[in-house]
Amino acid sequence: QKEVEQNSGPLSVPEGAIASLNCTYSDRGSQSFFWYRQYSGKSPELIMFIYSNGDKEDGRFTAQLNKASQYVSLLIRDSQPSDSATYLCAVNSGGYQKVTFGTGTKLQVIP
Amino acid sequence: KAGVTQTPRYLIKTRGQQVTLSCSPISGHRSVSWYQQTPGQGLQFLFEYFSETQRNKGNFPGRFSGRQFSNSRSEMNVSTLELGDSALYLCASSSSTDYNSPLHFGNGTRLTVT
């Protein structure tokens, strides 16, 4: 079983819709959770991080964490074509900076 | 503030050769992590350094090594290159010893082994 799992997609949504990206992790001791966006040919860039159960909002982005279910998600409201990228879920299990990444979900926003 | 700088951006090497990649973290960041990214495996953790000490290591063979200098700059070395080492190598820095601190990535070094 992979430590961090994501659906590889592609996830296609129309412009203006809500995109929902999901991630599950296997280590119950995981402490911090990150979402990165990676455009083709570019390096990952941090979108959001979340440490506590519940929701965290930043502009059009909302991260949701449920530690009991070992589940973290990212919602993108009012999706734009510029949001088309691969979204990487990353988890730090508490061992300093040993961050494990999922393989990413490719999002396509259709104009 | 300047971001994470990786050099070179592109490298082409032959099987059996060795290669050294360089990473300069964001000013003030003392933790430097290295990742290998391939289409099939995604981002795989190589190792992490803090204050010149390797704190974590991933599941890569001993051909992959690294070090960190007193100014927090880091290098990674791959010896006896294999075709499967062709990948994007990413360096990331973070600001503190707190494991919650996010990683900030450089632009990567694209290594091609022929």
Image: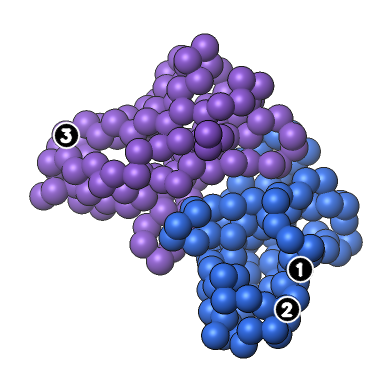
Chain colours: A purple, B blue
What whole-number distance in Å separates the C-alpha atoms at marks 1 and 3?
A: 47 Å
Mark 2 closeness class: few <14, some 14–19, many ≥20 residues within 10 Å: few
Disc 2 on helix, strand or loop? Answer: loop
Amino acid type, residue under disc 1 in the picture: Arg
Q: Is residue A77 above or below residue B30?
A: above
Report the residue at 22% width, 31% height from top: A18
User: Where does residue B27 sit, x and y in percent of width and height?
Assistant: 72, 57
What whole-number distance in Å separates the C-alpha atoms at marks 2 and 3?
A: 49 Å
Q: Which residue is mark 3?
A: A17
Looking at the rendered image, the quarter that the N terminus of chain B falls into is bottom right
User: Can residue A19 be seen in the rendering of this structure?
Assistant: yes
Foreground pick, A98 / A16: A98
Report the residue at 41% width, 53% height from top: A38
Amino acid type, residue under disc 3 in the picture: Ala
Q: Chain ID for label 1? A: B
What whole-number distance in Å separates the C-alpha atoms at marks 2 and 1?
A: 7 Å
Asked if badges 1 and 3 are on one and the same chain, I answer: no
**Tag of residue B63:** 1
Corner quadrant of residue A75: top left
Report the residue at 57% width, 56% height from top: B105
Q: Which residue is mark 2?
A: B80
